[in-house]
Image (spheres, rainbow, N blue to C red):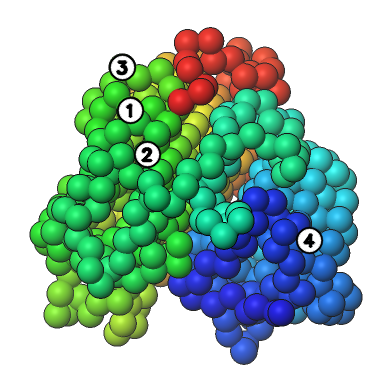
Amino acid sequence: VSVNIGYYTTLSGLGTTPSQVRIANVLADNGASDHTIGALNNFWRSAENFETKPSYSANGQPNTMQWAVSQGVSLRRVVVKGNLDLFQADGYASGGYMSNSRVTGTVRSGGQQQWFTRNANISAWIGGNWNMMYVGVTGEVPSEVCANKTSLQTRIEVTPIIAEKPFISFVNGRFYLSVPIVEVNKFGASDFDELAMKQIDFSRVYVASNESDTADTINAKIIQGCDVILTGGTYRLKSAIRVTKSDTVVLGIGFPTLMSVDGNAVIAVEDDLEGVRIGGVLLQAGPEKTDVLLKFGVTKGSGTGYNFLYDIWARIGGPNDPAVEQWTADIIVQVNSNNVVVDNTWLWRADHDAEGLVKNGDNPCNTGLQINGDNVVAYSLKVEHTLQHLVEWNGNNGSTYFFQSEFPYDVDQQQYGDQGYNAWKVADTVTDFYGVGLGMYSYFRDHEVYVDTAISAPSSEGIVFENVCTVFLNGFGGIKHVVNGLGATVNTTWADTPSAWCYLNDKSKSQSDVARGTKWSGADTDIDG
């Protein structure tokens, strides 16, 4: 069997281990016949929990799985007995995510502008462009590099804390929801034969359908103690799916789209919960203005266990014609609770829609991600084109490993640059934060706009940035500085090459093992949640 993965498609093996589901070839080809465009539009697709021994020849290399993708994608819990190419021919590709996987051959990144890999065992990695990050990865990955006006390669020894994404398995004629345990200081991929997990029989799992279910019917099942599988399709929700119990799993398969109809959130999580796992959903704004699409908690709460978000996608505009109907949300994802781990996002205010290019601030959205809780850990954040700060980080003791972003295309200097907006804004009240591998790009398509600094943060010893960069993609204007007024300008004179700032704060905790990811310090938290 060979499978070509297209839009809104999730390929999910049903084994308890990847080796129980074997697929000859799994492919994601360029989305455009013009290879210079390449895979830039190859989003909304994922593959997980299978083994492949590819017979395909990709880019002149035999026995290769070709995974030419960008942004809203994930590759998890996969064993490739051969090579893996993240591109096709000489085409561009704009970032992706791989975790908890094994590749016995060589990974080639080719035209990928940036890429995040977590907890993978690979033989060798060839290539690297603007911003490449490897967290808890074994094998011959590139040596760490950060220098002004060059590409960035960042290696973090271990993943501080993670619980791998839940998945569906089929054993002895019955379906189960498999929920892996929380792991700390994780190095390499899981031992799939030994990884401890909770197996939940489908008698306790509600499988929802967009054709018959509403938020009310789904919420009733959660109250009864069921976990929820959201199958593919568009759920036009007039109220939020409410997670009201600890250890609840809400898992999407086939990119279910949760659309706000009446200005409501589409997912809301109550305070003081632990062990919540939400993943594989596409959040979509609707015609009524929404304050927040996904709201995790109302206050910081009193819980000590961790909660997890996986593969959270979002789209503000895109399928609509803004001349007929604007789709809008103030904030896409807001995390108010403490102790939340975010593992892979793409939060996108669309730059194109059903009628062409989005212009003049149509389909408005202010901020992609707002963090108000403490002890929040994020891996592989991607936020693009919102009209104010792309990310607002207001919580203490947070950390982020990899960030991909683009400023909005359709603003002018007065609307954006003069307002002092940033790609990453740390609040003045924050005293501790660690960010590594953050990339911020400009394509001010319609007007000349200069942003003063991509990252703005207080000058505190506990606030640390490492290996952060800006890139001018195209258009007008540019970015004057990387972080807090430091770093060289990128503009038409210096395009398509990073301006990097390798280290901010000489007296910071980034000198210690904790922030480099080589030691987890979580004595005040309960990792069993």
Residue 80: image tag: 4
Q: Position of residue 328 (x, y in %)?
A: 20, 60
Q: Horizontal placement of 218 versus 278: left or right?
A: left
Q: Residue at x 78, y 61 (%)?
A: 80
Nearest-to-viewer mark from 1 and 3: 1
Residue 248: image tag: 2
Looking at the image, do the residues carrying marks 2 and 1 touch, with CB atoms under 8 Å apart?
A: yes
Secondary element at image label 4: strand
Looking at the image, do the residues carrying marks 3 and 4 touch, with CB atoms under 8 Å apart?
A: no
Q: Earlier in the sequence, mark 3 or mark 4?
A: 4
Task: For residue 74, say whether it is visible.
Answer: no
Q: Residue at x 59, y 75 (%)?
A: 5
Residue nearest the viewer, comparing 122 with 364: 122
Q: Horizontal placement of 484 versus 231: left or right?
A: right
Q: Position of residue 258 (x, y in %)?
A: 29, 61
Residue 302: image tag: 3
Q: Earlier in the sequence, mark 1 or mark 3?
A: 1
Secondary element at image label 1: loop
Cα separation, mark 1 vs mark 3, equals 8 Å
Residue nearest the viewer, comparing 146 with 499: 146
Cα separation, mark 4 vs mark 2, equals 31 Å
Instruction: Check disc 1 and report the residue beneath it.
Output: 273
Quadrant of the rendering where the N terminus is positioned: bottom right
Crowdedness near tag 1: few (<14), some (14–19) or many (≥20) residues, C-alpha within 10 Å: many
Crowdedness near tag 4: few (<14), some (14–19) or many (≥20) residues, C-alpha within 10 Å: many
Looking at the image, do the residues carrying marks 1 and 3 touch, with CB atoms under 8 Å apart?
A: no
Looking at the image, do the residues carrying marks 4 and 2 touch, with CB atoms under 8 Å apart?
A: no
Q: Amino acid at mark 4?
A: Val
Cα separation, mark 3 vs mark 2, equals 18 Å
